[in-house]
Amino acid sequence: MATRYWVGGSGTWDASDTTHWAAASNGAGGQSVPTSADNANIDLNSGSGGTVTINGNHTVFSFNGGGFPGTIDWSVNNNDFTSLGGFAFNDFSGTVATVKLGSGTFYLDTISVIQGSALAWVPGTALLQFGNRGNPTTSLGIALISSFPVTNVQVGPDASWPLHTFSNSPVITNLTLAGPVKVRGNITITVTNLTGTASAKGKGVETRGEPTQTWAVTNPATLHWSVLRGVTFSVAAARAYNSMNGGSCVNVQISPPKYGRIIGG
């Protein structure tokens, strides 16, 4: 595994140009373009400004874009992007930065966008799809604060049923919980449209409030084959079909399965 740092300010991140990749922060360019085995960083030493334009469907082990005083732009080419580990925009240290996600699909393990009042966050219509792609951990984090809203999010499906932990009270327009998937978080999640699907009977959504979790859903939500624990639906009610009430649920009508039983992880 190698760690690569963008250098030289404005340029295009494609599959062949090594000019902007260094082995150390503020190092010399000419290193290999990061691949699925590598960590990619665009940081405070990546240039005094300018725009990093992503061109091509890239896969990296992890990505950190914190601190770059310029624009990181997926919206020009609207490519897909895969990060097998973390995907983060955290420590901007007061720099003026812009992130444009465009309309591609981001296949992610975890996300962390939690700091930097100077960050201009432009989510576009990109789909953030979360799953245990490269990280064997049983707990995956989705850290988005309300000032960095996102348009389209899908959590799951997951073969190994890790826990996806929401934090920092995210704001999401369209959220799909694609079973089998488990979600938790002792927070309020603001959602316009929430849908919970099942890949097969008994393989839907499991929620765990800690001790409570509030889903502020604008439009009535519909879930299937779910196990709901400690969840309150505010603003609009929810309906869960072929599902089970694990206790302390508010403003949701839960209909149990007619045959058999739900087996939770």
Image: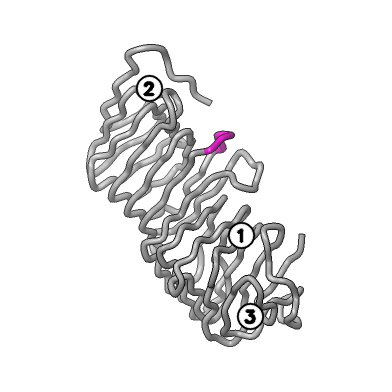
For residue 160: magenta? yes
Q: Residues within 10 Å of mark 1 (few under 14, many from 20)?
A: many
Which picture quadrant has residue 2? Answer: bottom right
As helix, strand or loop, the secondary structure at mark 3 comes to helix
- In the displayed structure, would residue 253 be above or below residue 97? above
Give the x, y percent position of residue 114. 50, 62
Helix, strand or loop: magenta stretch: loop
As helix, strand or loop, the secondary structure at mark 1 comes to strand
Q: Which of 113 and 16 is in front in this view?
A: 16
Pointer 2 or 1: first along the chain: 1
Q: What stretch is highlighted in magenta?
A: 158-162
Residue, disc 1: 59
For residue 243: magenta? no
Residue occupying image coordinates x 59% and y 57%: 83
Q: Looking at the picture, which amino acid does disc 1 mark?
A: Thr
Q: Nearer the viewer, residue 140 or 225?
A: 225
Q: Looking at the picture, which amino acid does disc 3 mark?
A: Ser
Residue, disc 2: 244
Measure the alpha-carbon separation of dots 3 and 2: 51 Å
Q: Which colour scheme is used?
A: one colour
Measure the alpha-carbon separation of dots 2 and 1: 38 Å
